[in-house]
Image (cartoon, rainbow, N blue to C red):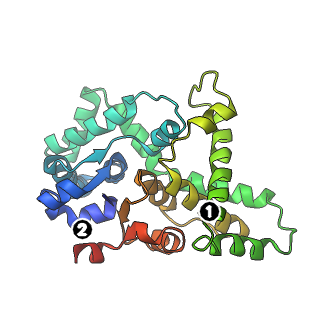
């Protein structure tokens, strides 16, 4: 299957209703989130409403779990879909309204202000993402002179060493399971670390490995995340199967995926060909 992220949806919007796209492609609620979050005035309302309308009316399949929800589910944690449903309702409301001012009024009338505010916070997540990396860099131990060479050796050999990729993935599975134990936003019940690891279903393997590589490069080389890197990375969580491919022209994703998952990314131009 081919996953269409936000920019590829824009480019390919006129084709979404065709049989090939309906049978072989899908998108996600994250695309709808990004489109809705970018609505600031009458001009952006009209521009983005048109794309959202095409997504909804084309009936292209969509994964309507938020990235955070997918991460929880991958570890066997049940999450209610109230926020997901609220966002999809906002998309439908956007389509139904004729103007931005009407859209704002209807959000209040339909008790959707909570989800509209959620999107506002989501749209500003990159600032907090960058700040978290600055703090980690401030406390990171850079004393090992072989650190950069070891990092390059570790990630440059993935194609020739499947065992190494599995070892890195296992480390990341454990790392994110530990983070879930301290996540104050969810209730994991009585699940232990071993329970979480045992329940992991490998549905977000590509996302975990790419996030691990991304994090390592930013910390070790003291680089700052770029604009929209957080949301661009989040789109990878929708590659549920080893053969799924993301359609994207994003330079960061292309560079990273060609290094780690060469067969799982296609540029929009090549896809159209």
Q: Residue at x 61, y 70 (%)?
A: 158
Q: Return the residue nearer the eye: 242 or 192.
A: 242
Residue 159 location in percent, x, y? 57, 72
Q: Residue at x 57, y 25 (%)?
A: 187
Quadrant of image for the C terminus: bottom left
Residue 130 seen: yes
Residue 50 seen: no
The residue at which mark 2 appears reads as 11
Kindly state the secondary structure of the residue where label 1 is placed: helix
- State which tag comes first along the sequence, 1 or 2: 2
Q: Within 10 Å of the Cα at label 2, are there few (<14), some (14-19), or many (20+) other Cα atoms?
A: some
Q: Residue at x 25, y 63 (%)?
A: 10
Residue 15 location in percent, x, y? 15, 63
Residue 79, relative to residue 127: is it above or below? Answer: above
Residue 170 location in percent, x, y? 65, 51
Q: In which quarter of the image is residue 270?
A: bottom left
Q: Quadrant of residue 150?
A: bottom right
Q: Return the residue nearer the eye: 53 or 112.
A: 53
The residue at which mark 1 appears reads as 165
Residue 229 — which label? Answer: none
Q: Residue extending furthest top?
A: 190
Whole-angstrom CA distance, mark 1 to mark 2, is 34 Å
Query: 230 left or right of 1?
Result: right
Residue 77 location in percent, x, y? 52, 31
Residue 263, relative to residue 86: is it above or below? Answer: below
- State yes or no: discs 1 and 2 in contact (Cβ < 8 Å): no
């Amino acid at each position: 299957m081919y996953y269409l992220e936000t920019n590829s949806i824009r480019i390919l919007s006129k084709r979404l209703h065709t049989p090939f796209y309906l049978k072989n492609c899908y998108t996600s609620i994250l695309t709808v989130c990004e489109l809705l979050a970018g609505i600031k005035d009458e001009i952006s309302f009209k521009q983005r409403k048109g794309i959202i309308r095409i997504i909804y009316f084309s009936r292209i399949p969509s994964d309507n779990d938020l990235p955070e929800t997918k991460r929880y589910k991958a570890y066997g944690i049940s999450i209610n879909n109230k926020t997901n449903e609220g966002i999809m309702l906002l998309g439908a409301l956007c389509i139904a309204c004729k103007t931005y001012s009407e859209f704002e009024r209807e959000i209040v009338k339909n008790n959707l202000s909570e989800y509209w505010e959620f999107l506002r916070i989501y749209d500003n997540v990159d600032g907090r993402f960058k700040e978290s990396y600055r703090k980690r860099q401030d406390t990171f131990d850079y004393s090992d002179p072989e650190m950069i060479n070891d990092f390059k050796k570790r990630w440059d050999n993935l194609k020739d060493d499947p065992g190494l990729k599995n070892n890195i993935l296992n480390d990341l599975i454990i790392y994110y399971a530990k983070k879930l134990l301290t996540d104050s936003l969810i209730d994991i019940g009585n699940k232990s670390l071993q329970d979480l690891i045992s329940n992991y279903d490998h549905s977000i393997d590509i996302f975990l490995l790419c996030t691990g590589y991304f994090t390592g490069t930013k910390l070790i080389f003291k680089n700052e995340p770029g604009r929209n890197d957080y949301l661009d990375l989040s789109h990878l969580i929708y590659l549920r199967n080893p053969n799924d491919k993301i359609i994207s022209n994003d330079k960061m994703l292309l560079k990273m995926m060609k290094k780690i998952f060469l067969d799982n990314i296609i540029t929009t131009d090549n896809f159209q060909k």
